[in-house]
Amino acid sequence: MKINDIEKLEYDDWWQLKDIEIPCLGEHMVSIGFDAEWIGEGNQCVEVPPSKRQLETLLYISKLPKAFIRKARDKIIRNCEQVMEETDYGYDLQINTKKIEKYFKLNQVIIPLQKRTDAKNFILLGGCAWEGEHGLGLLCRNDKIIKVGAQSDFL
C-alpha cells in the first residue's frame, strides 16, 4: 500500500498501520507505529488514535527524497565501526563501508507524539549486519538525521 490519502490508511490497531511503502526507505514494505496517547483513568482508560500531527508527520516522511538516508551515510559508518570495535564478534565481519547500504535495512517507522509544532520527529528502525542483537536506529527531525545508534537507544 502506498500513502496517497491519509484518510484511507488501514490500521491493525490504533497505534499500528498495516505495512506500507515509504520511498526513501527503499522498495519494501515498512511497519508504521505511533506512540499512543491515553485518556481517562483505570478501567475507563482508552487509547486515542494517532493525532493529526502524527499523521501529517507520516505524510511528510512519505514525501522525503530517496537520497534522505544517504545523508546519514557517514553517521551509519561511524556506528558500524564503533560497534565492530567494541564487540567480540566485530572482527569476523567484513563490511565494505563504501557499500554500507547493502548491510542494513530500515523496516520500521515510529512516530512519537508531536509536542513541538515546528518539528516533525520520527524514528527509523531496522536490522544491520554489525549489530544483529540490537539493530540500527535513526532519530530524525524534519529532513535531518540527528542521531544514529542501536534500536534500544530510541525505544
Image (spheres, rainbow, N blue to C red):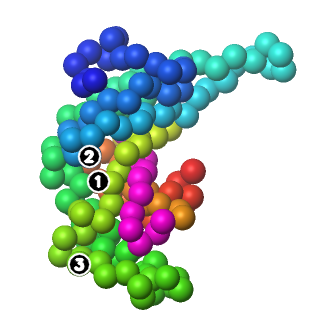
> Vertically, is 155 above or below 41?
below
Q: Is residue 121 magenta?
A: yes
Type of residue at label 3?
Asn
Earlier-in-chain disc, 2 versus 1: 2
Q: CA distance from mark 3 to mark 1?
A: 25 Å
Tell which tag, 2 or 3, sits nearer the viewer.
3
Type of secondary structure dominating the magenta stretch: strand
Examine the image and state in which quarter residue 109 appears.
Answer: top left
Residue range corresponding to the magenta coloring: 120-132
In the drawing, what numbered circle is on residue 36? none
In the drawing, what numbered circle is on residue 25? 2
Q: CA distance from mark 2 to mark 1?
A: 15 Å
Q: Residue at x 16, y 47 (%)?
A: 66
> Total of numbered circles in the picture?
3
In the drawing, what numbered circle is on residue 96? 3
Asked if the residue under mark 3 is in contact with the one under mark 2, i.e. CB atoms within 8 Å, the reply is no
